[in-house]
Image (cartoon, rainbow, N blue to C red):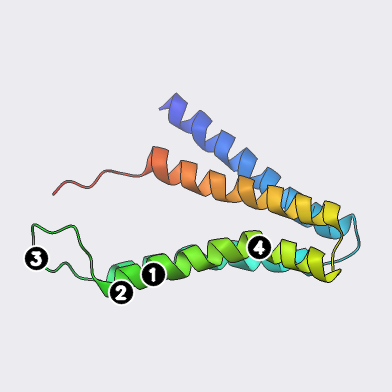
């Protein structure tokens, strides 16, 4: 129990550090365009959750979930890729500076890493 609590506190700290990096990439360089990346962090898990609920199994012995689940995976991957590439596009267009891009991408890595770590370590295993 104590190890789980320490893990959650550690993941919360890393998540807060990731959001701090993204916000600091905006505040230090007086340009709020990198804040659009936060929208991709919020919206990325939604297609997976929505389409995962809609998808039904073809039969009881198959692990294949159908086309809707695949569409959800695709849209989630698209949003995650957008979260990393949007700061690069902004920097290439001259909208933000290179250090702001690096801070925004670093914050994104911390945020996505936290979400993945949480889902790996604290997800309940389903019994079939």
- Which tag is nearer the camera, tag 4 or tag 1? 4
Residue furthest to the left: 60
Sort mark 1 into few (<14), some (14-19) or many (20+) by Cα contacts within 10 Å: many
What distance separates the C-alpha of mark 1 from that of mark 2? 6 Å
Q: Which residue is drawn at the image coordinates 8% and 60% (left, top)? A: 60
Element carrying mark 2: helix
Q: Which residue is drawn at the image coordinates 13% and 69% (left, top)? A: 58
Element carrying mark 1: helix
Closer to the chain start, of discs 3 and 2, is: 3
User: Where is mark 4, residue-wise?
Assistant: 85
Residue 74 rendering spot, x and y as whole percentages: 42, 68
Closer to the chain start, of discs 4 and 1, is: 1
Element carrying mark 4: helix
User: Where is mark 1, residue-wise?
Assistant: 72
In which quadrant of the rendered view does residue 88 lie?
Answer: bottom right
In terms of depth relative to the viewer, which is nearer, 88 or 9? 88
In which quadrant of the rendered view does residue 64 lie?
Answer: bottom left
User: Where is mark 2, residue-wise?
Assistant: 68
In which quadrant of the rendered view does residue 113 lie?
Answer: top right
Residue furthest to the top: 2
**Residue 59 badge:** 3
Q: Which residue is drawn at the image coordinates 26% and 43% (left, top)? A: 125
What distance separates the C-alpha of mark 3 from that of mark 1? 20 Å
Sort mark 3 into few (<14), some (14-19) or many (20+) by Cα contacts within 10 Å: few
Q: Are marks 1 and 2 in contact (CB under 8 Å)?
A: yes
Q: Are marks 4 and 2 in contact (CB under 8 Å)?
A: no
What distance separates the C-alpha of mark 4 from that of mark 1? 20 Å
- Which tag is nearer the camera, tag 4 or tag 2? 4
């Amino acid at each position: 129990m104590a190890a789980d609590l320490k893990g959650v506190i550690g993941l919360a700290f890393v998540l807060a550090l990731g959001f701090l990096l993204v916000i600091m990439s905006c505040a230090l360089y007086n340009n709020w365009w990198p804040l659009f990346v936060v929208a991709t962090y919020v919206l990325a898990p939604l297609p997976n959750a929505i389409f995962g609920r809609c998808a039904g199994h073809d039969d009881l012995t198959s692990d294949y979930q159908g086309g809707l689940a695949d569409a959800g995976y695709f849209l989630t991957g698209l949003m995650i890729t957008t979260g990393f590439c949007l700061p690069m596009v902004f920097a290439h267009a001259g909208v933000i500076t290179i250090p702001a891009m690096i801070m925004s991408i670093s914050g994104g890595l911390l945020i996505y890493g936290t979400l993945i770590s949480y889902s790996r370590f604290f997800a309940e295993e389903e019994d079939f």
